[in-house]
Image: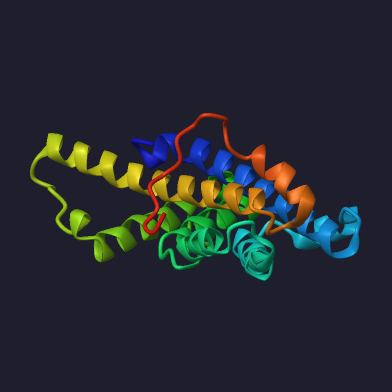
Amino acid sequence: MRYISLQGDAVFTLGSIGVEKAMKIMLGCAEVELVGAWPTQATLRGWGHDLETLDQRLSAALQGGLSKAKSGGYAATLATRIRDSQTLPLIFETFSRYGKSGRFHHLDILATDSPQEDVAPAQYWERVEQRLRDTEPEFNGVPFNDNEAHERYQSRLRRRIAGELETWWFCVHRLGVQGCLGELGTKVGWELWEPGRTGPSIAGI
């Protein structure tokens, strides 16, 4: 994504829908393991579209299933990696805002001819980028006075964010395969990652 104003909607749409579906599918596997049946439609609807809440629910299910993992140490490292991320909660917050109502933000402004009270999704994304600027030395200094350097900086910054989301996806895939969400979770876990695709580098693995 080069310009949030131009490509933001595409990224937020695909991100919010894809992450929500992945979370709910894996939570469904956990439900099958727990009660022996796929969640009812009412249960699925009750889970809603709040990715922050879904993330907490899935994290709890994964933590609770670590004792079932084929390789306990490996699974614990994966679970710790995504649990301790400072960036993922802000990414999910952005996607959650967009998924619940943010996709209508600019349409509502046109319809009402007045500013919206809710913060625009693009501003949520800025929080993600600002967190990285504040916490990772590589991104501390923004080269505002050099257009080409600034383009390269923005590209690296957004690749870093995309890499964090890819790491989450990989970890959920591997934790599913490890058996943390039961037998069905093992089977579905294989479907979350393209065969032959190289996984991200994770410390401790």
Left or right position of 137 against 197:
left
Tell me which corner region of the image, top left, top right, bottom left or bottom right, holds residue 136. bottom left
Residue at the (21%, 43%) spot, across then down? 153
Whole-percent x and y of residue 118?
53, 62
Q: How is the image coloured?
A: rainbow
Q: Of all residues shown, which one is farthest toward the top? A: 196
Image quarter where the N terminus lies is: top left
- Considering every residue shown, the one lying at the far front of the view is 71
Percent from the top left, x then y, of residue 30? Answer: 77, 59
Residue at left offset 40%, top offset 53%: 202
Q: Residue at x 63, y 66 (%)?
A: 66
Above/below status of 39 relative to 21: below
Q: Would you place residue 93 above or below residue 20 in this image?
A: below
Question: Residue 198 versus residue 161: which sits nearer the camera?
Answer: 198
Number of labels in the image equals 0
Q: Position of residue 54 (x, y in %)?
A: 66, 62
* Left or right of 3 in this view: 166: right
Quadrant housing the C terminus: bottom left
Rendered position, 43 above or below 173: below
Question: Would residue 183 be found to the left or right of residue 18 on screen?
Answer: right
Residue shown at 68%/59% (left/top)? 180
User: Is residue 108 visible to us here?
Assistant: no
Frontmost residue, 33 versus 15: 33
- Tell me, yes or no, if residue 134 can be seen here: yes
Q: Residue furthest left?
A: 145
